[in-house]
Image: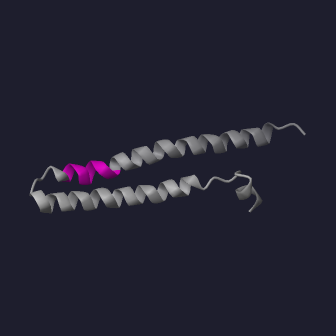
Amino acid sequence: MGDFLKFETMMTPAVIQIAFWLAVAATIIAGIVGIIGTGDARWILLIVLGPIGARVYAEIIIVFFRINDHLRAIQHYTQRE
């Protein structure tokens, strides 16, 4: 709990994963509604490419947090006492 209060533990990666799944659901629902509403098969591109784009975006953000974790580990192991 102390690490959480001192911002040593990041909760944003978990929030990013939740946002990813919400984005996947939203793009699939929007694609299905678009197909039903317009009858245009181009909405299939949203169903296919939407989740891929959301995944790429989420991974890019999570990479920054992983870099931070690795830098903290390096600092921990190289810290002089």
Report the side of 32 relative to 58 (left or right).
Answer: left
Count of numbered marks: 0
Nearest the eye: 28 or 78: 28
Over which residues does the magenta segment extend? Answer: 44-51
Q: Position of residue 16 (x, y in %)?
A: 49, 53
Is residue 12 on the magenta stretch?
Answer: no
Dividing the image into 4 quarters, which one contains the C terminus? top right
Residue toward you, 63 or 12: 12
* Image position, residue 21 (x, y; %): 41, 59
Quadrant of residue 70 in the image? top right
Q: Is residue 67 left or right of residue 52?
A: right
Q: Give the color scheme: rainbow, by chain, secondary structure or one colour.
A: one colour
Residue positioned 80% across, 37% down in the render? 78
In which quadrant will I find the N terminus? bottom right
Res 3 quadrant in image? bottom right
Residue that protrudes farthest toward the left in the picture: 39
Q: Residue at x 48, y 56 (%)?
A: 17
Identify the residue shown where x is 45% and y is 48%: 58
Position in image of residue 33 (x %, y %) = 19, 62
Please tell me which residue is depicted at 22% across the width and 57% down the height of the picture. Answer: 31
Extreme right residue here? 81
Above or below residue 30? Residue 74 is above
User: Which secondary structure type mostly characterizes the magenta part of the structure?
Assistant: helix
* Residue 18 locus on image (x, y percent): 47, 60
Asked if the magenta segment contains residue 45, the reply would be yes
